[in-house]
Image: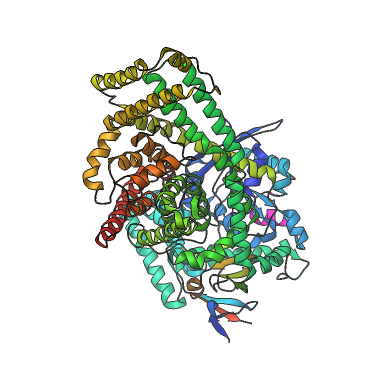
Amino acid sequence: MNVRKMRQMLKNQSGTISAIRANGELGRRIRDMGLVPGASITIRGHAPLKDPVALRVMGFTLTLRNSEADLIDVEVK
Amino acid sequence: MTATIALAGNPNAGKTSLFNVLTGARQHVGNYPGVTVEKKEGIYIDQERKFRIVDLPGTYSLTAYSMEEVVARDYLVNEEPAVVIDILDASNLERNLYLTVQLLELGVRVCVALNMMDVAKNRGISINVDKLSMLLGAPVIPMVARSGIGKKEVMVASGEVADLSAVRPKLEITYGEDIDQALAELTDLIKEHRFLTDTYPALWIALKYIEEDKQIKDLGKGADPEVSARLEKIVDRLSRHLQKTLNTYPEALIADHRYGYIKSIIRQGVVTYHHKQDRLYISDKIDKVVTNRFAGPMIAAATIFGLYQFVFVYSEVPVGWFEGFFGWIGGFAETHLPEGLLKSLIISGIIDGVGGVLGFVPLLMFMFFGISLLEDSGYLARVAFMLDRVFRIFGLHGSSVMAFIVSGGIAGGCAVPGVMATRTLKSKRERLATLLTVPFMNCGAKLPVFALLVAAFFSENQAVFMFFITLAAWVGALLVAKLFRSTIIRGASAPFVMELPPYRVPTFRGLVIHTWERTWQYIRKAGTVVLSISILLWAMMTFPGLPKSEEHGFDNARKKILAATPLNTASGLDSQKMGDDLSPQAESVRKALLRVDAQEAEAALKHSVAGRMGIALEKVSHWAGFDWRTNIALVGGFAAKEIVVATMGTAYSLGEVDPEETMGLSKKLANSPNWRPLVALSLIFFVMFYTPCFVAVVCISREAGSWKWGAFSMIFNTLLAFMLAVLIFQIGSALGF
């Protein structure tokens, strides 16, 4: 199994979310946007200063700050 | 009574398009009571029926974290609309259904409008509408809102839902054994004590307790603290159990099961994909260029510059019309009203005041149009994405950039549209911090003051100096933002979880409606307040008038000049018409008379409330190097920064000075013993940072939702500006400048 934090994923890498370690408002925001364990995601790219990160989930594009991506574990394909 | 239909849906799902298509021009914008969330209402009429349509704020969910969500939820529960039309983006069904599920959990009557069927079709997504309708237990109507396809059908279906006499059974999802068991226990307790059940369904209350929903828990504590405590105890037990066995939170588990339920719907043949799902769409191809590491920032800079040009250069013509119009009215009043206080009130108080408010209108319309274009097309989200890293350092958000630019981040903007531009910011703290710091930018009205002072004292390096002034404003604004975010608006930054919506060509109609409704709101809300403050400022600079004895003195001076004038010269003066050349003698007499007028104006200003304030303030202001004349000008600048220059002219007995023609004043300052370059520098910093003009203050109060923030920005900014000015003046003096 190749699990890593979302921040460490490279552009165009895909994977399945295995765990989300965010609680409270952030946790809820993340889940509201469809980031839940089992969802498959693809990294679309990073902003010019490497942060935030843009990713594709359920057919749409979402952005997260790196500090937020740190709380999401992804099993990389 | 007309039945009400509420529109709910995710941001970017086409809610506004549907609202516009349904209501046409029969709509108005207001605010939800007590909050700054926009409330849009309109009327839908066809041959058979009439509905009141309420556009709820776009939300992804019905939790209680954002103001928008609380507003939407309260509306659904308290106002009980006959039907809720839930607008879904068909090309993005899975996430959109998350809100639908929550609406069904709440037990409201839902009619689903499946929007953007054209986009879904292009993406090779086909949806079995009947099956989806059957599984959800609600009508599902395919549509393309922006072109009005399906509008009639949606309203027919909504009408049918509204007419249903039986209440729909609430959706009951299974959330897994542990939670279901706790839910049953909670629901029993809630039903037994009729705990909040007059307002909410019992199961829903139970769910919200498990989700740790602050609003509902507070309501519950207020209603029946004992039952509330018992409920919380059950939730605690569940929470500990889930932590131990599954290492997860109850609310996370609930979300998982909602998505699981949605997946099960979709997998029952509701959605078929004809292409591979992660292929690149046009939007993604555009993004490859537009958010590219090198091209991206350059395109963003060009776009921002373009927006700036559009707002401030192209609006010049209509701004000119407005100015011309009010100039004409003022001129009309000047010639047709009898001399006296009433005339002065009408011209300087009312016409200038109303003109001041309406003068911003073309500027605002251009700004709202430009920003709506960027927002609706989806580009603004990309700019926020690219710049977030920079703005985050100061506790702001990527989207703050637009407000700063419009306010004068490129010198010459205006804080009023800048403050309004903060509406694109969705996170509360970042928005407030942006709102309070954009007035530091160098708006177009501060520029004449800077130009005057730079021309008088730093004429060798004008360009460098102006650049330096712009830079100082940015540094100041960002540092103050940082200060606010680590003191009075402290708190973690809102999550940057943001959708990058697919690029879309905005509809012209949508842009026009958007622009107009925001502009109208400004006129209506700012107008009344601005007019009264304008009259107040006029009164401060007019009353009390000169004592009779002094007035006589000036009259006598005039009489003396005229008495010394030969009769034919004087009659030449009287009969002088526009464009006639005066004889050299008559010209010198006229100048002498004007000098007396100007001296009288100076004396009257000194004598007025504002003048006395200026003189009284000298005790403090001399620390920064300002004399009473500067003080009055700064007081006047609260009305509008342009007035600083005009008032200084009056105070230096030059009569009113046109801000565009300041050579005379500039020379006068350069030769005045009270002035030297250090004083000018100190004043430049003071003008840059002191209180926003009152139109901006009114807007800040409106946008921040409280007069406290308007008052705060006046006091804080002035104190900050004064500190800076004193610092510059004292250190400079000590160094011998």
Span of residues in magenta: B130-140
Residue A2 covered by magenta stretch: no
On screen, residue B259 above or below B82: below
Residue B695 in view here: no
Q: Quadrant of residue B536?
A: top left
Q: Position of residue B479 (x, y in %)?
A: 39, 62
In the foreground, B543 or B60: B543
In the foreground, B573 or B628: B573
Name the residue rendered at 62%, 57% in the picture: B303
Residue B133 covered by magenta stretch: yes
Q: Is residue B255 left or right of residue B592?
A: right
On screen, residue B320 above or below B720: above
On screen, residue B345 above or below B640: above
In the foreground, B364 or B339: B339
Q: Position of residue A44 (x, y in %)?
A: 63, 72
Point out the image quarter for the C terminus of chain B. bottom left
Name the magenta segment's main secondary structure: helix
On screen, residue B500 above or below B590: below
Q: Position of residue B210 (x, y in %)?
A: 43, 62
Q: Position of residue B367 (x, y in %)?
A: 57, 46
Residue A10 in view here: yes
Question: What colour scheme does the image use?
Answer: rainbow
Number of marks: 0
In this view, which residue lies farthest toward the left? B619
Point out the image quarter for the N terminus of chain B. top right
Q: Quadrant of residue B328?
A: top right
